[in-house]
């Protein structure tokens, strides 16, 4: 019985951070109300897009739900997706390095993580399913599967 | 004995009151409270501890001293006030402020930068550029410093506001404004990628105390709201005020009804406050640099891809080696992203995806790109022009001419840190005087012109040249009581013949009030050239003919030549020739400040 409890506890201990990391995208409200378009003036005005910032703060989920490395990575990916797509296609770039550093990934692991993310990204492009959220999930899956020891997701 | 005690106590009270009164009138205390004249500019009550704090600095000082001692909340909310009072010898018990510590990442701000987002002619609110403050942390996680914090001062506007209310309220004080703090990557993406604006970062050489005070005061200002005025009480004014507070230097020119963002950058340079200058190039600037890097074969294939994405399967692309393919595709990525900024055609998105698909098939590589040399904004001419000229006119003889332009630049000004080949003038006022006459020659409320040239030669880069002008000018050079209100629009096309020669043709319809049979509507086709011989000599020449469309008035030839000699930040010499029935020759010195 004790063994079973310990096994369950270990499983919970191991899966909770991963679950939390994967769900950071949704917990932060990214992709919905986080960075709303601001109507006719969009983001083009110094006056108007301050509103964008205000709105983003107020419509974001609470800070506690949206704190931590995975959440910061999620926000970063959402905001810089175009650059990340390009750098991933090219195989290197400052934005990818930033995301990996947000997730505290050991420098030595960067090359291998990028290669695996790149390979999955190629399939997503082929299928026409490349989105910022898919990119985030791709990165998190690669890290959780093979590089959990080299990175810090929570 | 009791009499002595009462006397001593009274003396102490008197001394304490005198000290409080002196401190509460200290200019630094008034700056911390944002007082101008007899009250604070800050409208939000939460910024003040005393109910009288917004108009009684002594009451606010008393309340601050008292509450800093017994309230952790106040102690943590007002770190700049506290630090200043401690410097003045008033000490407080220590409290732990976890939120403030988190904001400063445990006091890890290693320097502070001022960032200039270059002007953007796509939106009136962005014509003059914009300043941002950046807290640079010891954090080395991002090679591009994307995880630093950016502090922005701007107006809070409702989501569903219509353009007319937006302009009226922005100009006449209908919006609240304040400082907001977000990750730098948010602003970097908005400016560089979505608005195609270069960001010039000036790292300031402030000392620790100055840096700490800016950080602490920005924290205090989190909930402060101030009425926003687009021209005067704007981002430039409030950022200038912050710099004034910590450096003791003057950043805002008192008495002027406007504050211009780029002036801050001239001032920090003039006050030797700059440690480092760095450019964060926009998507458009990067694209231009990449195009310049490509060899002829690569560029030719790039043109094919940008004209027709299916040419990726043609022999031209296939004939490139791997490195050439990689450079061509990476330039194409920038091109399609750049085009998507102003064009929502879904084909552009699909094309970019196809380019990404091709690139991901190639091995990873890190290409080196040409960086287009650019000069920072403080090297440009200062924005406010005052010009004194002498002129000779065939009709009026010799005379003097005075011109005042509060902002910003014209076609012959040096192209530094602004949209290339463009002009932007506000309230450009010209007065001529002879020995017996004085008259208003021109008053242009707003004049904008963009030659909109392609700098890459690729489809969709550049477009029609255009201009808009609202104001009043002389009907022709022979009369001095004939200044009429007008609105002019122009559209045409510019061609860059070489690095130094540019020509353009434009047709300018004009609506004006009637004067001596002129009618209301005229049109002027004209041909013009811009010749840049050196940085110190640029000539603009235009020849046109005005046709009056709704009256039977004879068409008139109009010629105009203007040359700029010198490219100093503070002065230049202008020579001009104008012909419009009469002929007029002028020579003047322009002073910029």
Image (tube, rainbow, N blue to C red):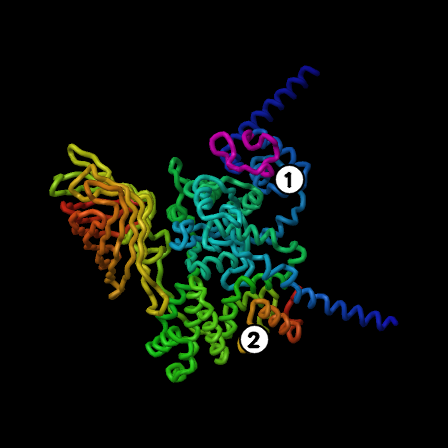
Q: Is residue B209 left or right of residue A1?
A: left
Mark 1 is surrounded, within 10 Å at the Cα level, by few (under 14), some (14 to 19) or many (20 or more) other residues, namely some
Which residue sits at x=56%, y=75%?
A124
Q: Is residue A69 left or right of residue B505?
A: right
Q: Is residue B35 magenta?
A: yes
Image quarter (top left, top right, bottom left or bottom right) of the N terminus of chain B: top right
Q: Is residue B5 left or right of residue B133?
A: right
Asked if residue B410 is positioned above or below residue B431 in the image, the reply reads below
Which residue sits at x=22%, y=36%?
B439
Residue closest to the eye, B233 or B440:
B440
**Quadrant location of residue B276?**
bottom left
Question: Which residue position is annotated with label 2?
Answer: A124
Asked if residue B24 is positioned above or below residue B535 in the image, the reply reads above
Question: Which residue position is annotated with label 1?
Answer: B74
Q: Chain of mark 1?
A: B
* Contact? badges 1 and 2 (CB < 8 Å): no
């Amino acid at each position: 019985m004790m063994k079973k409890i310990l096994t369950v506890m270990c499983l919970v201990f191991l899966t909770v951070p991963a679950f939390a990391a994967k769900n950071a995208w949704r917990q932060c409200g990214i992709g919905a109300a986080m960075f709303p378009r601001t109507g006719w003036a969009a983001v083009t005005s110094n006056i108007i897009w301050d509103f964008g910032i205000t709105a983003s703060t107020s419509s974001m989920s609470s800070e506690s739900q949206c704190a931590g490395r995975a959440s910061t990575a999620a926000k970063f990916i959402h905001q810089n997706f175009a650059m990340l797509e390009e750098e991933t296609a090219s195989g290197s770039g400052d934005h990818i390095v930033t995301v990996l550093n947000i997730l505290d990934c050991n420098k030595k692991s960067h090359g291998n993580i990028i290669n695996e993310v790149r390979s999955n990204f190629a399939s997503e492009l082929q299928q026409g399913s490349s989105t910022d959220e898919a990119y985030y999930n791709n990165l998190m899956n690669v890290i959780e599967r093979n590089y959990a020891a080299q990175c810090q997701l929570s | 004995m009791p009499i002595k005690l009462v006397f001593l106590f009274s003396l102490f009270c008197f001394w304490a009151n005198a000290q409080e009164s002196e401190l509460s009138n200290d200019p630094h205390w008034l700056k911390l409270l944002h007082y101008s004249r007899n009250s604070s500019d800050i409208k939000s009550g939460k910024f003040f501890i005393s109910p009288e704090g917004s108009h009684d600095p002594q009451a606010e000082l008393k309340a601050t001293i008292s509450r800093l001692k017994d309230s952790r909340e106040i102690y943590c909310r007002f770190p700049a006030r506290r630090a200043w009072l401690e410097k003045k010898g008033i000490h407080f018990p220590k409290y732990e402020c976890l939120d403030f510590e988190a904001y400063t990442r445990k006091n890890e701000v290693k320097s502070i930068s001022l960032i200039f987002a270059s002007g953007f002619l796509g939106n009136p609110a962005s014509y003059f550029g914009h300043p941002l403050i950046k807290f640079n942390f010891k954090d080395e996680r991002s090679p591009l410093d994307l995880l630093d914090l950016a502090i922005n001062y701007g107006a809070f506007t409702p989501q569903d506001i219509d353009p007319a209310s937006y302009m009226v309220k922005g100009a006449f004080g209908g919006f609240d404004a304040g400082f907001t703090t977000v990750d730098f990557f948010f602003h970097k993406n908005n400016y560089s990628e979505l608005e195609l604006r270069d960001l010039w970062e000036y790292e300031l050489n402030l000392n620790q105390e100055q840096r700490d005070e800016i950080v602490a005061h920005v924290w205090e200002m989190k909930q402060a709201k101030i009425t926003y005025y687009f021209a005067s009480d704007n981002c430039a004014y409030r950022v200038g005020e912050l710099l004034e507070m910590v450096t003791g230097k003057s950043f805002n020119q008192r008495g002027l009804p406007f504050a211009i963002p780029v002036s801050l950058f001239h001032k920090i340079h003039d006050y030797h406050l700059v440690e480092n200058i760095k450019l964060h190039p926009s998507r458009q600037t990067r694209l231009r640099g990449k195009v310049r890097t490509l060899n002829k074969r690569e560029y030719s294939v790039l043109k094919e891809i940008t004209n027709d994405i299916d040419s990726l399967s043609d022999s031209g692309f296939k004939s490139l080696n791997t490195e050439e393919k990689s450079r061509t595709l990476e330039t194409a990525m920038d091109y399609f992203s750049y085009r998507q900024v102003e064009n929502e055609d879904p084909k552009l998105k699909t094309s970019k995806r196809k380019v990404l698909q091709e690139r991901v098939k190639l091995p990873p590589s890190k290409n080196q790109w040409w960086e287009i040399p650019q000069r920072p904004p403080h090297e440009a001419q200062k924005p406010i022009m005052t010009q004194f000229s002498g002129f000779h006119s065939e009709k009026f003889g010799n005379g003097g001419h005075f011109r005042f332009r509060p902002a910003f630049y014209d076609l012959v000004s040096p192209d530094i840190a602004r949209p290339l080949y463009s002009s932007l003038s506000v309230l450009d006022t010209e007065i001529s005087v002879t020995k017996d006459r004085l008259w208003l020659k021109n008053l242009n409320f707003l004049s904008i012109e963009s030659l909109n040239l392609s700098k890459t030669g690729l489809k969709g880069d550049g477009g029609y040249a255009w201009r808009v002008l609202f104001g009043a000018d002389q009907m022709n050079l022979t009369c001095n009581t004939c200044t009429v209100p007008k609105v002019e629009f122009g559209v045409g096309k510019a061609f860059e013949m070489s690095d130094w020669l540019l020509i353009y043709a434009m047709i300018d319809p004009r609506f004006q009030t009637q004067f001596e049979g002129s009618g209301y509507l005229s049109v002027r086709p004209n041909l013009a050239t811009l010749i840049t011989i050196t940085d110190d000599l640029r000539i603009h020449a235009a020849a046109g003919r005005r046709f009056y469309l709704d009256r039977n008035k004879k068409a008139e030839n109009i010629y105009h030549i203007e040359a700029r000699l010198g490219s100093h930040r503070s002065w230049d010499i202008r020579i001009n020739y104008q012909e419009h029935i009469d002929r007029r020759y002028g020579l003047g010195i322009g002073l910029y400040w």
